[in-house]
Image: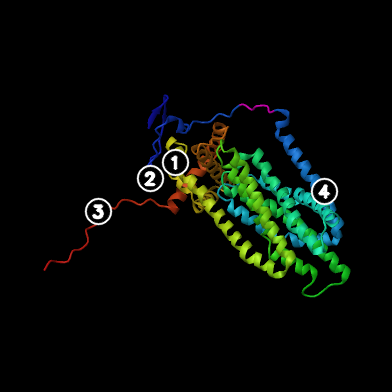
């Protein structure tokens, strides 16, 4: 016990095996002491900054785009074609979304950002792409001196479509970067948002292609194992469901890297998103161009470009996710030193296995409400570590103190359930090594002759 400002505050004893407490020479870098935080008085935002108004505007845009794209798809495919195409196009969506959520387990973002990204890709991006591609196809057919329909298709699919579609999809990530920049704390954030946006785009596009294939099959009476719908389903849903997420991930990584730049690096902040978008356009154009040329070109692009880039991207995402866990392990001990956390918590919070064990222990002891409380505690602690790491790199958020206080307040409300569960999980996954006593005997020495 030590006296602090006339009050006695107990300091948790550090268990063996979890390392010494950090020492802070500068008092400005020391976190606040754990006193009961008082809620700040609510400030009345200006009219155009009200949350309800912004949500209403976004919902209106997405709804209008959704109605328009639904009408266009129905006009192109008919009722039966749209239903068949929608059912088949929906099959890869849960798998792709589950993969992106698995990557985002360390610091999961708000669901409203994910819903916005998917809705933008499914409605706004596809609407822009359909209108622009239709206009471009007419312009190519009448304005360019193309010698054949194949050359016109090559211009449209390899040049125009990649530029339009990738720009429309990247706009969703750019909007979140401009208005919610604090969300981007690593490469995983940009990659996940890009993947979810592209999944929504591919979903609507697959409905259109599969619906058209069904309509053609019904019109011409095509049947058999190589029917039009079967070929389209295998090519777009089975063979390449990751194509659009792979392309847009390049733009997402560029925007995420721009969010990690320092304030004085303005040129780099502009060039990185542009470079990511250009990479997405080039890969999309290569993919579409190889599909128009011949089967050997398509298989070559798929085998020697798309699959290796996809594997490299998965490795990069997993490595970046591990970097967030290392950040938690490095920066949370500051709050343990100040008394907000017990010393074992940074160990548990830097391990996905320990986090899962803590949620399971809380659920077994107190039910699902306790499990949700531990999950909220883990999210807030991770966001706190990332916020502090950003300040340590010389890029503190403008509202650092406000956000730090809000995160600590959330953790304070759940600490009664979360701290015991996380402490037990830490000792379960990484038990401290006691010092042997008595000391071990020296090794046996053979007798001298």
Task: Give how far apart the Cα atoms at labels 1 and 4 are.
Answer: 51 Å
Q: Is residue 103 covered in magenta?
A: no
Residue found at x 70% / y 64%: 290
Does label 2 or label 4 sit earlier along the sequence?
2
Residue 401: percent from left, percent from top: 54, 31
Q: Under tag 1, what secondary structure?
A: helix
* Left or right of residue 390: residue 301: right
Q: Residue 333 carries which label?
A: 1
Label 2–label 4 contact, CB within 8 A: no
Q: Mark 2 points at which residue?
A: 19
Label 3: few (<14), some or many (≥20) within 10 Å?
A: few
Q: Name the residue under label 4.
A: 67
Q: Is residue 345 above or below residue 449?
A: above
Label 2–label 1 contact, CB within 8 A: yes
Task: Give how far apart the Cα atoms at labels 3 and 1 are.
Answer: 31 Å
Mark 3 vs mark 1: in front = 1
Number of numbered callouts drawn: 4
Mark 3 vs mark 2: in front = 2
Residue found at x 70% / y 31%: 49
Does label 4 or label 3 sit earlier along the sequence?
4
Q: Under tag 3, what secondary structure?
A: loop
Q: Mark 3 points at which residue?
A: 439
Label 2: few (<14), some or many (≥20) within 10 Å?
A: few
Task: Give how far apart the Cα atoms at labels 2 and 1 are.
Answer: 10 Å
């Amino acid at each position: 016990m030590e006296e602090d400002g006339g009050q006695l505050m107990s300091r948790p004893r550090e268990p063996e095996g979890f390392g010494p407490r950090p020492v802070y020479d500068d008092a400005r870098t020391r976190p606040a002491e754990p006193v009961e935080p008082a809620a700040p008085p609510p400030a009345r935002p200006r009219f155009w900054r009200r949350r309800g108004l912004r949500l209403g505007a976004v919902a209106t845009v997405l709804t209008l785009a959704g109605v328009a794209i639904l009408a266009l798809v129905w006009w192109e495919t008919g009722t039966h074609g749209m239903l068949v195409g929608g059912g088949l196009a929906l099959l890869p969506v849960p798998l792709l979304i589950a993969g992106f959520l698995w990557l985002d387990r360390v610091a999961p973002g708000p669901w409203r950002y994910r819903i916005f990204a998917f809705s933008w890709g499914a409605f706004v991006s596809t609407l822009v792409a359909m209108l622009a591609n239709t206009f471009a196809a007419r312009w190519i057919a009448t304005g360019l001196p193309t010698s054949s329909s194949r050359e016109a298709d090559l211009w449209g699919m390899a040049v125009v479509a990649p530029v339009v579609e990738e720009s429309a999809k990247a706009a969703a990530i750019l909007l979140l970067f401009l208005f919610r920049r604090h969300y981007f704390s690593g490469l995983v954030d940009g990659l996940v948002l890009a993947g979810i946006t592209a999944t929504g785009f591919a979903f609507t596009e697959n409905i259109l292609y599969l619906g058209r294939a069904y309509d053609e099959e019904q019109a011409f009476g095509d049947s058999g194992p190589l029917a039009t719908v079967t070929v389209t389903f295998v090519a777009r849903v089975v063979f390449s469901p990751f194509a659009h997420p792979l392309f847009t991930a390049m733009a997402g990584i560029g925007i995420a890297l721009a969010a990690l730049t320092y304030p004085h690096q303005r040129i780099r902040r502009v060039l990185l998103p542009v470079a990511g978008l250009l990479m997405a356009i080039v890969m999309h154009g290569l993919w579409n161009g190889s599909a128009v040329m011949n089967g050997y070109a398509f298989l070559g692009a798929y085998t020697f470009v798309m699959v290796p880039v996809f594997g490299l991207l998965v490795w990069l995402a997993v490595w970046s996710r591990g970097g967030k866990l290392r950040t938690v392990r490095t920066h949370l001990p500051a709050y343990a030193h100040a008394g907000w956390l017990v010393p074992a918590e940074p160990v548990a919070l830097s391990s996905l296995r320990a986090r899962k064990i803590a949620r399971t222990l809380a659920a077994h002891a107190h039910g699902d409400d306790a499990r949700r409380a531990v999950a909220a505690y883990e999210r807030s602690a991770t966001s706190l570590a990332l916020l502090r790491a950003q300040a340590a790199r010389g890029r503190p958020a403008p509202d650092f103190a406000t956000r730090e206080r809000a995160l600590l307040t959330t953790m304070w409300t759940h600490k009664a359930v979360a701290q015991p569960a996380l402490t037990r999980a830490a000792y379960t996954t990484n038990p401290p090594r006691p010092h042997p006593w008595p000391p071990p005997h020296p090794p046996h020495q053979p007798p001298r002759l």
